[in-house]
């Protein structure tokens, strides 16, 4: 029971609610590992802390001995996933997909054990489908169901064009779950529709439906939109320590608790203590704790301490002799008296 609660910690959506316990019990009875799916389209070459929210949850399942399957959208990325912003996303070339996928897999190793995970490319099975087979798969889904996706519904209502390939996209992503026989599919809350499509298609193919587990979307440095490379508001997993520290210090105070919960690996007791400190302490001191924790995760403790020292010299002591500068929003470092503290 404690294990299940730990796995469900921070999850925003879990469908069905009691499904995880049933899946785990069944896997134990059948003496097999759960197959945990995470699919991604390699639309940009770098991963960031927003991706890490899901990846760290994936790591928890891996640490318990379950089988992680990373499905690289080598086919679907060439189609273009609907962006969720009322417009189409530009499809990628085969070369772009290959390059981005290679860098993604390398960066995944910062969080999960890539050697123990299975990496699958959905072009392996989607390229092999005949047109009649694709039509047969599509016959399991109605247009009315697709219109339940919020961005499709909004664009349809506003008479904004929706291309046919966009409607097909979530169906193909759902078919990935059929091919790998996923027990659980993970993603951000913006992937809920696509994940539930996988569950539906599995049931249409007379398979047990996968559990859908969606993690919260981490807000970016602006504190408004979700963290996204296209919005230039990210902290990358391969950013240099000084850059990681500076960017973390630039987040609005309103984001401190969200970053504490979703980006750090403090224990529950440590998080409680930090939240208590936040009531009376300078928010900048809490941001420093978060920044050092993040850097320790993706680099090491020594790099975290050096990055803090660099930040203090560069901004608080105003020692600007160093040639290594970090661009951050100075406004976020000021207190109510408009002073850098």
Image (cartoon, helix red, strand yellow):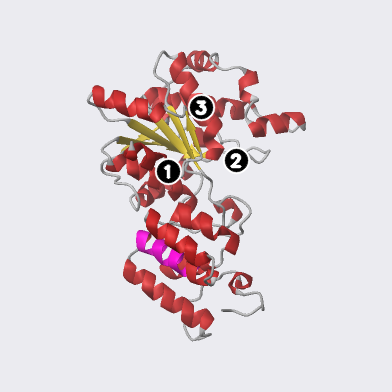
Q: Is residue 340 left or right of residue 130?
A: right
Q: Is residue 298 left or right of residue 253?
A: left
Earlier residue among tags 3 and 1? 1
Q: Is residue 48 visible?
A: no
The residue at 46%/45% (across/down) is: 10
The residue at 44%/19% (across/down) is: 202
Based on the picture, tell me whether residue 6 belongs to the magenta stretch: no
Based on the picture, tell me whether residue 288 belongs to the magenta stretch: yes
Which numbered disc, 1 or 2, marks the residue closer to the eye?
1
Q: Quadrant of residue 158?
A: top right
> Does 103 appear above or below 141?
below
Name the disc covering residue 323, or none: none
The residue at 58%/57% (across/down) is: 232
The residue wearing badge 3 is: 196
The residue wearing badge 1 is: 9
Write the start and end of the magenta stretch as one range.
287-297
- Residue 190 in picture, x, y percent from top left: 56, 39
Q: Nearer the viewer, residue 136 or 218?
A: 218
Q: Nearer the viewer, residue 302 or 280?
A: 280
SS assignment for the magenta stretch, majority: helix
Name the disc covering residue 90, or none: 2
Earlier residue among tags 1 and 2? 1
Cα gap from disc 3 to disc 2, whole angstroms: 24 Å
Which numbered disc, 3 or 1, marks the residue closer to the eye?
1
Question: Do residues under tags 3 and 1 come within 8 Å of each other at their CB atoms?
Answer: no
- Residue 135 in picture, x, y percent from top left: 53, 15
Q: Nearer the viewer, residue 132 or 22?
A: 22
Q: Nearer the viewer, residue 254 or 221?
A: 254
Q: Is residue 225 visible?
A: yes
């Amino acid at each position: 029971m404690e294990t299940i609660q730990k796995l469900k910690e921070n999850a925003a959506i879990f469908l069905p609610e009691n499904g995880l316990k049933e899946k785990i019990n069944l896997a134990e009875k059948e003496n097999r590992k759960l197959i945990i799916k995470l699919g991604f389209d390699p639309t940009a070459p770098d991963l960031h802390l927003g991706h890490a929210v899901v990846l760290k949850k994936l790591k928890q399942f891996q640490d318990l001995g379950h089988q992680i399957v990373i499905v690289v959208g080598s086919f679907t990325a060439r189609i273009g996933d609907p962006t969720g912003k009322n417009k189409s996303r530009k499809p990628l070339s085969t070369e772009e997909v290959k390059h981005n996928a290679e860098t993604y897999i390398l960066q995944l190793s910062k969080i999960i054990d890539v050697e123990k995970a299975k990496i699958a490319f959905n072009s392996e099975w989607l390229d092999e489908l005949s047109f009649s087979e694709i039509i047969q798969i599509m016959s399991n889904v109605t247009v009315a169901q697709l219109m339940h996706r919020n961005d499709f519904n909004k664009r349809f209502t506003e008479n904004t064009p929706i291309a046919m390939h966009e409607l097909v996209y979530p169906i193909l992503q759902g078919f990935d779950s059929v091919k790998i026989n996923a027990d659980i599919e993970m993603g951000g809350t913006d992937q809920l529709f696509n994940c539930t499509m996988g569950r539906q298609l599995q049931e249409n193919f007379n398979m047990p439906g996968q559990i859908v587990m969606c993690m919260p979307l981490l807000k970016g440095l602006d504190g408004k939109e979700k963290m996204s490379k296209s919005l230039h508001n990210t902290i990358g997993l391969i950013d240099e320590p000084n850059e990681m520290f500076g960017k973390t210090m630039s987040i609005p105070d309103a984001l401190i608790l969200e970053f504490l919960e979703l980006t750090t690996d403090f224990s529950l007791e440590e998080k409680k203590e930090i939240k208590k400190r936040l009531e009376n302490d300078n928010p900048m001191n809490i941001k420093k704790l978060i920044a050092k924790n993040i850097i320790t995760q993706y680099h090491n403790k020594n790099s975290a301490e050096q990055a803090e020292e660099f930040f203090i010299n560069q901004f608080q002591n105003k020692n600007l002799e160093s040639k290594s500068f970090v661009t951050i929003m100075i406004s976020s470092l000021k207190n109510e008296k408009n002073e850098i503290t």
